[in-house]
Amino acid sequence: MSDTITTDVPARLDRLPWSRWHWTVVIGLGTVWILDGLEVTIVGNLAPRLAEASAGLGITEAQVTGLAAALYVAGSCTGALLFGYLTDRFGRRKLFMITLAVYLAATAMTAVAFAPWWFFVFRFVTGLGIGGEYAAINSAVDELIPSSHRGRVDLAINGTYWLGAVGGALLSIVALNTNFLPADVGWRVSFALGVVLGLVILLVRRNVPESPRWLFIHGRDDEARRLVDEVERTVRDETGQGLSTVHDTIEIEQRETIGFLTIAKTVLTTYPKRTVLGLSLFIGQAFLYNAVTFGYASILTTFFDVDAAHTGYFYAVIAVGNFLGPVALGTLFDTLGRKPMIAGTYLASGILLFVTAWLFSQGVLSAVTMTICWTVVLFFASTGASSAYLTVSEIFPMETRAMAIAFFYAIGTALGGITGPLLFADLTSSGVVGDTVLAFCVGAAVMTAGGIVAIFFAVDAAGKGLESIAAPLTSRTKAGSAAAASA
């Protein structure tokens, strides 16, 4: 029989001042996005080298950018859904250790690939680990970070993907230079460096605890209280600050497991407006990013005569802009609020991409000025895309959090990895200005539509505890349930 308990654990976590303990959480969990950016960028930029006979793999460039990329996307979607469900059922910590282990093992196996089938298999498995990371990590981070910092921290963490992209772009330049490394060694070293970085993250991650919120929901309230007691002692010692007395409590009915149908019903029927919001945000950013980044190298080489070996430098500049957006604007999500910032970043990036398309159609851009335009567009787009992960992580009940992230991530990733190439590949590589302009306009239109949806459906979540934004399914607190039902 289920027990009903009253707990102050969420309020105690939310009122903590920022400390070194929180930095441990951020470094141990958040830096994994660097690995994803590194992975994707390295494979894309090393495709020509992998296709060379001297690389020792026996694979074509079309297979690297086509089949291998599709398998990575399929693995990411599968991993997000599989590990997202397991994260909600068995806990954040257990799964974020498993998903990182899967990534490390698969990347190591990719580095020693000796045949195409081996490369393909472990690109899929690498995707499994990365997709699982998105679900397990975002849910854990949001449940451990104080509500006053949740927006800026979540955005900055998701934005670190682009630090990995910068590293991947620059690393690929070295790996492609046979003066530094032989053709059959450089690409293997690139993957091996990802393993080394992952091992460092694993060492830090061992110190990150289970989410106390997950513990008390699943009948382990004594363990949750002991964990929060320990965290409070650590934070007091680190900051030298006293902690205010907490009066806010929540009453919940503890359950060890919650069925998949209950989770699905909650996301799709209990919160239909929030579901539309999540879909709009993820689809918008998927289309804009594919419109810009899928064919950036082809656009530079075709229209601006940039040497293919030098496109990595341009991509590094774009990636820096992507990283700076969430870092520079993240604080405003906690001060100005979610709705104006989500809608504003989506609308700004969409409108600016329309302007870029018009300038390109007029023939007034060079490789440098086109890159500047892309960088400005993606400064806002990256912030908006990061806010999509923040949004779906905080607007659904705790029992569904990882699965909700997985659901929306899988849809966005599938659209980006399947619809994107089908729609944009021919448009951006045809050599016809009008085709590339159309690609930009499609991406801009869908991103703008996401911003309009956010104006009407975005939730005012800044500075609020997760349980007040969406009451747990097991909540017996009338006020929290009523607030959730009205949203």
Image (cartoon, helix red, strand yellow):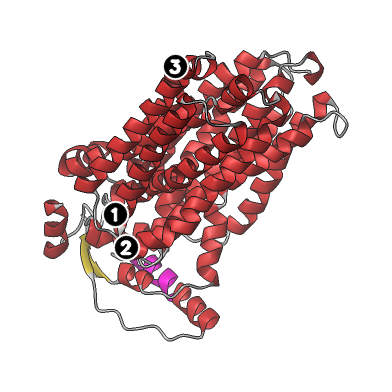
> Disc 2 residue type?
Leu
Report how far apart the C-alphas of labels 2 and 1 lie in the structure.
7 Å
Position of 43 compared to 451: left or right?
A: right
Decide if residue 112 is on the left or right side of residue 367.
right
Image quarter of the N terminus: bottom left
Q: Nearer the viewer, residue 182 or 478?
A: 182
Q: At numbered mark 3, what does the secondary structure look like: helix, strand or loop?
A: helix
Left or right? Give the position of 100 relative to 288.
right
Instruction: Point out the frontmost of discs 3 and 2.
Output: 2
Quadrant of residue 106 within the rendered picture: top right
The magenta region covers 220-229
Q: What's under tag 3, amino acid-wise?
A: Leu
Residue under label 2, please give it. Answer: 336
Percent x, y of residue 471: 21, 57
Report the residue at 50% width, 49% height from top: 159
Please tell me in which quadrant of the rendered image residue 217 appears: bottom left
Please name the residue that numbered disc 3 is placed on. Answer: 422
Residue 17 at x, y percent in the picture: 43, 75
CB atoms of marks 2 and 1 within 8 Å: yes
Q: Main secondary structure of the magenta part?
A: helix
Residue that numbered label 1 is attached to: 340
